Image (spheres, coloured by chain):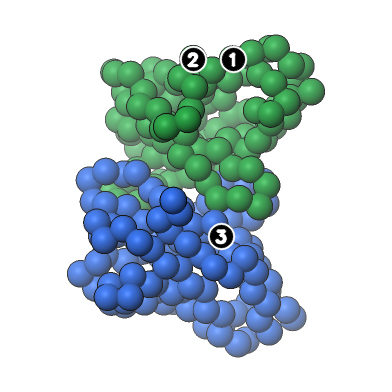
Amino acid sequence: DQQVKQNSPSLSVQEGRISILNCDYTNSMFDYFLWYKKYPAEGPTFLISISSIKDKNEDGRFTVFLNKSAKHLSLHIVPSQPGDSAVYFCAAITSGTYKYIFGTGTRLKVLA
Amino acid sequence: GAVVSQHPSWVICKSGTSVKIECRSLDFQATTMFWYRQFPKQSLMLMATSNEGSKATYEQGVEKDKFLINHASLTLSTLTVTSAHPEDSSFYICSAPVGETQYFGPGTRLLVL
């Protein structure tokens, strides 16, 4: 049972435009969500997170939106840069458990 | 941010041998560390939770006798793949939490011939 889903395995965006990566979850016990960026043969790098008490968190070019009623979160990257090309994973946890559940990842390609 | 290292980054071994992978938190202490495995084009799958001073907790379907975990200190956890077989070839990643955020090591690519 895939509790965290990223339905788009890949996404291509022109440099300078907005990249929107989506993530859906099924477990209502999740109350903290994170986005990670991963290059091949490297460990994931933390990007941004959001608590379930918020619906938006912004950090520079990265903004995460959370829609609890829809059990949906998204990562917006504006403006997209070629260096953003990587696989992006969303992850969800229930506070205090540390047990991350990862989505399957979306490969973002930013075209110059 | 917090730094987690892994060693080795890349290992090739013969079938039947054992391989030890180290995970270290470099600038913080971690009573808990996590071991993940990633197959090509798939998500990271949690294998086990490493607990300092106590036994590791394994996820369903993960053989504890095959994947031995030892959390020797507050900065070191080791994963030993015993009697490795080609199907164990994968990318192994550890992580350690700081608050709610996990910081990941760079990963270890294991290839079993």
| Inter-mark Cα distance, 1 to 3 | 29 Å
| Inter-mark Cα distance, 2 to 1 | 8 Å
Q: Are marks 2 and 1 in contact (CB under 8 Å)?
A: yes
Q: Mark 3 lies on which chain?
A: A
Residue A67 x %, y %: 31, 76
| Inter-mark Cα distance, 3 to 2 | 30 Å
Q: Which residue lies furthest to the bottom in this view?
A: A17
Instruction: Answer with the quarter of the image where residue A71 lies.
Output: bottom left
Chain identifier, green in the render: B
Residue B113 visible in the snapshot = yes
Q: Is residue A43 above or below residue A49?
A: above
Q: How many labels were placed on the picture?
A: 3
Q: Which residue is depicted at the point 35% across and 37% down?
A: B28
Q: Which of marks 2 and 1 is in front?
A: 2
Residue B4 visible in the snapshot = no
Of pointers 2 and 1, the one earlier in the residue sequence: 2
Q: Is residue A14 above or below residue B82?
A: below
Decide: few, some or many residues near mark 1? Use Cα within 10 Å; few <14, some 14-19, many ≥20.
Answer: some
Image quadrant occupied by the C terminus of chain B: top right
Residue B34 x %, y %: 42, 35
Q: Do the residues labelled 3 and 2 touch (CB within 8 Å)?
A: no
Q: Do the residues labelled 1 and 3 touch (CB within 8 Å)?
A: no
Say which element carries label 3.
Answer: loop
Instruction: Answer with the quarter of the image where residue A99 lies.
Output: top left
Residue B56 x %, y %: 36, 23
Instruction: Answer with the quarter of the image where residue A69 lies.
Output: bottom left
Question: Which residue, given by chain and number where applicable, does mark 3 sit on?
Answer: A105
Question: Which residue, given by chain and number where applicable, does mark 1 sit on?
Answer: B82
Chain identifier, blue in the render: A
